[in-house]
Amino acid sequence: MRNLSGINLVNFLAGLFLAQLLFVIGADGVKTPEMCRALSLGLQYCHLAVFTWMAVMLLDMYRHCRSSVNLAANNNTNIKTDFFWFSLAGWGTPLVLVGIQLALLSSDIPAVPGDSPAAAADTTGCWWGQQPALVYTYTAPVFLLVLASLVCLLKAAVVVRYAVSMQIDRKVKEKMRRKRCLQLLLHGKLLLLLTLVAVTGTVSAAGDSQVARGAYGLLHSLLGLVVTLCLTCNCKVLRLYTKTWRQSRHVISDYGASGSGRSTSMEALALDAPEVV
């Protein structure tokens, strides 16, 4: 929460937590059709918010890398303005898309088999259902958001490579390369994981494939665990659990360790400048 990237990360994790919560609640289906439809729309909103905040995070990372070609902190004086527009895009855009989805469902468009909330509750849980409007209010926007996120990620990688090559000091060059590559890798992992969940969810909603539904349910069920591992894969938690009781009595010092080694991967997603060399 110390900078704009940290605030964006908190909003991304908040949307991800709400998506997991609604998924668990609607997994077994709800007897009331109206409640089931509300859960499905809420889950769609959270998924769209997660993808939007993912694109916002990658855009902010690209802007940070482009405006800061060294390890010095980038003093952004327009944090409030940027956060306002980021919040408007991150939470407002999904709200508009879900509103369009609700308007299409409430219109007189004839429904297809399996489009009712009750049918969705009996077959796939209160998730998507088989809704024709889903292509325009979920699949197409998610595809555009993934494409925009991928473009920002690739452009940030090009800028990082150029910035690293400009450094003269070998220690500074290695530190920048390690820090920036870790950030790019973690954002790429999150984008790939979320894309797989969206693809399996769309396929399971468009057809009657039990394999796609099972893959979607499995990926979504493991999403929280996998994201936790992705965010903490660079910390020393596992090493602490492997210490014996006798070794745990000694004080473990990380003197001399690099900043990237002491920090967790969640901290690496925030674009703080590392310690001065």
Image (cartoon, rainbow, N blue to C red):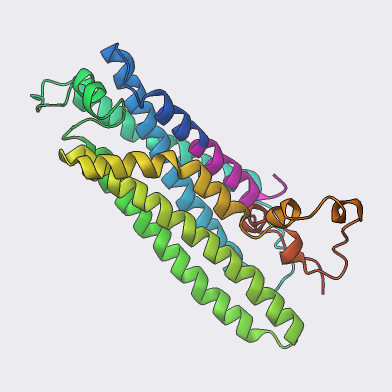
Q: Is residue 258 left or right of residue 28?
A: right
Q: Quadrant of residue 173?
A: bottom right
Identity of the residue drawn at 51% across and 72% down:
157
Q: Residue at x 55, y 57 (%)?
A: 60
Residue drawn 34% across the image and 23% down it? 28
Residue 2 magenta-drawn? yes
Asked if residue 87 shows in the view, the reply is yes
Residue 75, percent from left and from top: 72, 59
Residue furthest right in the image:
250
Give the answer, above or below, for where 60 lies relative to 171. above
Q: Position of residue 149 (x, y in %)?
A: 42, 58
Q: Quadrant of residue 116?
A: top left
- Give the dominant element type of the magenta stretch: helix, strand or loop: helix
User: Does residue 68 appear in the picture of this structure?
Assistant: no
Q: Position of residue 146 (x, y in %)?
A: 37, 55
- Quarter of the picture holding the C terminus: bottom right
Residue 22 magenta: no
Quarter of the view holding residue 251: bottom right
| Front in this rendered view, residue 39 or 123 | 123
* Quadrant where the image shows the N terminus: top right
Q: Which residues are magenta?
A: 1-16
| Residue 45 position within the rendered picture, expressed as x and y whole percent measured from the top left | 38, 33
Residue 94 as seen in the image, left or right of residue 249? left
Residue 20 or residue 51, whichever sits in front: 20
